[in-house]
Amino acid sequence: QVQLVDSGGGLVQAGGSLRLSCVASGSIFSVNGMGWYRQASGKQRELVATITSGGRTNYADSVKGRFIISRDNAKNAVYLQMNSLKPEDTSVYYCNADILASGSSYWGHYWGQGTQVTVSS
């Protein structure tokens, strides 16, 4: 069974940095796009950053210049380096990936379980 596990969240002071990791595992044939979303308390889940299999990235305006998304295709992993963190970045962060499971004819959009990031003011 295909799974995504994200990790690396924690408590950090404003202006600090944190690095999130996400690894896909299971019977994977291919991984296409990967990304990170976040959902703050009482708000809708929003896009943070995405990265294609070829390495093209895009970011939400609120994190441009502060966050960097990267991936390691050999490990089926995606990372989010978060710098200059602000209290408004406090959210549960979820990784996602478009994955074709081995033996399947259908691509699926998979999600990690979420990791809490709290930025103190």
Image: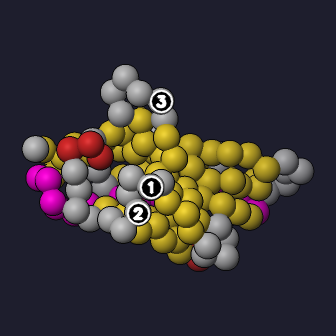
The structure's colour scheme is secondary structure
Q: Position of residue 96 (x, y in %)?
A: 57, 50
In this view, 91 is above or below 66: above
State the predominant SS element of the stretch in magenta.
strand
Q: Which residue is mark 3?
A: 44
Report, in whole angstroms, how far the alpha carbon at label 2 lies from the one at label 1: 5 Å
Residue that label 2 marks: 64
> Can the viewer see residue 58?
yes
The one nearer the camera, 112 or 83, is 83
Tags 2 and 1 touching, CB below 8 Å: yes
Mark sitting on residue 61: 1
Number of numbered discs on residues: 3
Residue 118 - label: none
Task: Specify few, some or many for label 3: CA neighbours under 10 Å numbering under 14, 14-19, or 20 or more.
Answer: few
Q: Which residues are magenta?
A: 13-29
Residue 114 or 89: which is nearer the viewer? 89
Q: Upstream in the sequence, badge 3 or badge 1?
A: 3
Question: Which of disc 3 and disc 2 is earlier in sequence?
Answer: 3
| Closer to viewer: mark 2 or mark 3 | 2
